Amino acid sequence: MRDWSHIATLQLLENWRRCGVGKIPRSSAEGVERACRWLEQVRLESGVESADLMGLVSSGPQSGMSVERSVTAAPPVVSLSKLAGIPQPSSPSIPPPASSHPETSSTAGNVPVAIPAKSPVAMPIIVGSSDEGRWTESSLDVGGRENRFKILAQDAAACRKCTEIVCSRKQTVFGVGPVNARLVMFGEAPGADEDRMGQPFVGAAGQLMDKILTASGLSRNEVYIMNSLKCRPPNNRTPTEIEVENCRPFFEAQLETIQPEYIICWGAVAVRAVLKTTESVGRLRGRFHQYKGAKVLVTYHPSYLLRNPDAKRLTWEDMKFLMKELGIPLPAPKKA
Ligand code: SF4
């Protein structure tokens, strides 16, 4: 067996594992040998040079690797020829992302998503784009998503990429909420309370976010809540660009797994992570942007709102804009 295919196979198996594919023969020499033979066959049939194939395999799931992520099916199907730009017949077994969002279902302890399935409101103009406007992977069912999140959360807990952060973090804060939420709350990084409790947005800023959600007719357990960083930066300092990039594989895999229809980016760090722009929140808010298959709304971070109460009015406008798009009427104001 040639060296390239052995190295590529090991990398491929690791990538599959990170993608949440089950039944991977990680420690089996026979399994690796079999996968090597299969990879060699892919190379011969696709006509892709071994060096190119090696590059495609090594770039990992963030590169747009198309994986049939069934945790029960074996062997998993990896479309390397698709990656290499070789035309493929469309597969009826993989539903299109836009319509493939599974029926609302909840994880243990979570309340099912009550957001209506379709918005009766005309689509606002979408500006800006950080990707091609679609999810790169096919959608998993709820069990598959939960399995994948377990693996990702374990990987994050074992991650030591940000050397300064890992010295001071108490634990990683992966994310919380229904794995099939239509709406994702995307924040900056855990603070002291989050670091202590292992949950995102549980401190003063989190309480304000809860109030904003309630005023909008939503509840915390209807949405998935996560941050760009899974660990608390020392003294709650702003995450560096390098740290956001270090954590990108985790948050991108989370979003790719959930495949939400809407993402709210709370604050500049979230904007930088999701939309890859340094434009200010003030310039980006008030309209939808695009991240893969999701519409992205930008607003101020609750911590900023606590320091600048006048800006609450602007975030409220953003929420009203989103609720109109979702077709959810705002609750009647409470009588004094
Ligand atoms: S912030 Fe993310 S990349 Fe950095 S150590 Fe924590 S999990 Fe790893």
Image (cartoon, rainbow, N blue to C red):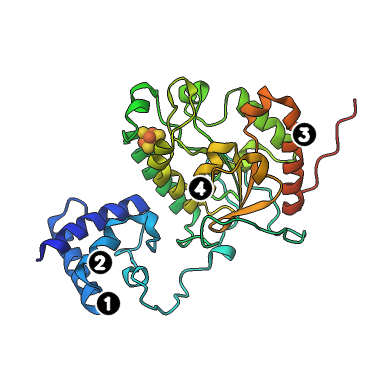
Q: Quadrant of residue 118?
A: bottom right
| Rendered view: 277 above or below 239 | below
Report the side of 280 relative to 155 (left or right): right
In the rendering, which numbered label is found on residue 295? none
Residue topped by disc 2 = 53
User: Alpha carbon of mark 2 to alpha carbon of mark 1: how far?
Assistant: 10 Å
Q: Residue furthest right?
A: 336
| Rendered view: 13 above or below 314 | below
In the rendering, which numbered label is found on residue 46? 1
Q: Earlier in the sequence, mark 4 or mark 2?
A: 2
Which x, y percent locates residue 41? Answer: 20, 74
The front one of 63 and 146 is 63
Q: Secondary structure at mark 3?
A: helix
Callout 2, which amino acid?
Leu
Residue 312 in view in this figure: yes
Callout 3, which amino acid?
Arg
Callout 4, which amino acid?
Lys
Looking at the rendered image, the disc whose residue lies closer to the viewer, 4 or 2, is: 4
